[in-house]
Image: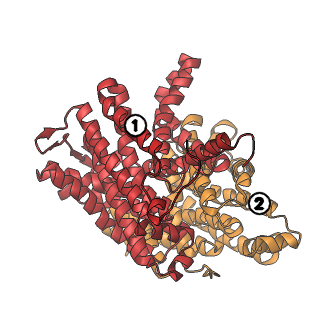
Amino acid sequence: MRTGDYKQSYGELVALIDSPPVWLWSAVLLLALIAAPWLLNSYALSFLMIILITVTGALGLNILTGYTGLISLGHVGFLVTGAYAYAVLVSKYHMPPLVGFLGAGIVPALASLIVGAPSLRLKGLYLAITTLAFSFIINTVILEMRWLTNGARGIQVQRPEILGISFDGDAAFTYLCLAFAASTLFATLNIRRSRVGRAFVAIRDNDTAARVMGINLHAYKLFAFVTSAFITGIAGALYGIYLSFVSVEGFPFLLSIEALAILIVGGLGSALGAVLGTVLIVLLPEATRLVFSLFSAQMDATFTTGAQELKSMLYGLVIILFLRFQPRGLVGAWHDIKRTWVHWPLRY
Amino acid sequence: MQYLIQLLISGLAIGAMYGLIAMGFAVIYKSTGLVNFAQGEMTMITAYIAWTISTTVSGNVFVVAIGAILAAVVLGLVIERLVMRPMLGEPVFATVMVTIGLAVILRSAINFIWDAYPHGLDIGMGRGIVHLGGIGVRTGQIAVIATLLLLLAAIWAFFRYSKVGVAMRAVAADDRTALLMGISATKVHALAWAASSAIAGIGGVFFALSYDLSPAMFQLGLKAFPATILGGLDAVLGSGLGGLLIGITENLAGGYLGSGMKEVAGFAMIIVVLMVRPFGIFGERDIERV
């Protein structure tokens, strides 16, 4: 039972995990995730894969939009660049998959420098618009560079074999996704509690004040861009492998919206929020389908025919409802519940 | 030479459509400080309603025009009342995200209410060809350019001389002071949404007349976006002219550099504009007080 915050040093204030129960639950979750591929059927397993890949991408966007407060409407651009970098390196030039993953991080990171540099002068909406423009330009660039990317025909991607271990099966590939998602989660949590993370948050909360405090705005904004694009690019490579085919159509603009929806639903600026948001957003269409199918077979049929439309409608609805009624997202709701539980019957 | 003039004229025509939608963006930005990401979708819905009127009620030009404008006004008012009004006073980020959510919903709604196939809007005119000095021009192209110029003049006069126009400018400049002077900010916002929806809707109907209706029409909003940025988000007239510039640039890029360039010419242009003059050619630089 936690009876108070007994913090006696600065180190304790920024500790990754500050209480034993959190260690325990994290370990339980990790064990559950490791056991999951053996217990779940292939249908449920595909959802787990998607969740893990999406978590990686959402955490990437979280660094830029959640921590640093720079809104990006073009993250699908980094996703598709990463996927193509991997596909071109591994499928076309037969490089080892590890090199492919490294390339999938580095190429979007370089691209983000091109977007990020002009964006340093821009704030808020204008930045969002530039990133939006970037994501459309990158699609055209990919389609035009036929000699490298096969243009509209796309590139076939095999499941990788790394250091002699084949990740061909669904269970094995889930472990690969789990490894990437878990290390991304650790990386972002550690970035958040370091000097760099505090600089990001300072820029988000008030950039003028941050600048007066001696934070180099340009350097940190670019750093946020590069880190975010690196992580997102790797998520893109994983998604490309999952689809086993990389093409521009596989990465529609809706993915950018989905990523922002995840952050808003989960709670902006929180790694836990990104994880919770992903689980909710990925499972939402499926859950809605289940609820509908309980009512009637006819509604179930509508769902199968208009699946894509209903899915995007749900995203839109969820974004609006959360912004209206729970702007702090699932994480905020969780904090409220905890507080109510501890203080009841007092208000605070 | 003939080819160049042809490109310029069709550029002006498509630019006028962008201009109309861009004016829609600017009207909302000017009075509420928001970028309405659902503008393209609202335009598309108005065009679809016009098509429904033309096929079910009557193909008469006036009936379709009046019906479409009324429908656009109602659409703008409903969205403002149901979706945007509750967000009053929330941070800009949240409100803009709401318009993005709205855009996604409206886009999918098209597929449910109507269908995913392309339709031609036929009201018996707009596709005829007039010869001007040896160059064939569609009547619809002339009509849309004329409409844009007329609306530009009307809106300039409205903001300059009418009491309501001045009130809207006052709300945009400082909503709290405007409130103290007895102007209802919410009513002004509602009016802005209705006007924006109608102006953009006119652009959408013209687009449907010259090309076809399809669920991909929402991209018109994305195409018109660079026009608003170019002209200045808070400059209604500038946005209209920005549309013409973007239309011409796009067509020249498409005609001389290839169709891939046509798609992104506008976006490449806004990146340059934002780097050089982030507030647009006709916009006002906003000064931040610390």
Q: Give the SS element for disc 1.
A: helix
Residue A15 in view (yes/no) = yes
Number of numbered discs on residues:
2
Q: Nearer the viewer, residue A1 or A252?
A: A1
Look at 37% across and 76% down and name the residue there: B1
Whether discs 2 and 1 lie on one chain: the answer is no
Where is residue B234 drawn, in percent x and y?
A: 64, 73
Above or below, A237 against B89 in this view is above
- Give the labeled residue for mark 1: A29
- Are there few (<14), some (14-19), or many (20+) residues within 10 Å of tag 2? many
**Residue B49 appears left or right of B10:** right
**Amino acid of disc 2:** Leu
**Residue A175 appears left or right of A30:** left
Where is residue A160 drawn, in percent x and y?
A: 18, 42
Above or below, A226 against A91 in this view is below
Q: Colour of chain B?
A: orange
**Residue furthest right in the image:** B182
* The N terminus of chain A lies in quadrant: top right
Label 2 marks a residue whose chain is B
Residue A126 in view (yes/no) = no
Where is residue B8 drawn, in percent x and y?
A: 45, 71
What separation in Å lies between label 2 and label 1 (alpha carbons)? 53 Å
- Give the labeled residue for mark 2: B191
Label 1 marks a residue whose chain is A
Provide the letter of the chain coloured red: A
Above or below, B86 against A287 in this view is below
Q: Give the SS element for disc 2.
A: helix
Where is residue A334 drawn, in percent x and y?
A: 58, 43
Q: Nearer the viewer, residue B233 or A295?
A: A295
**Amino acid of disc 1:** Leu
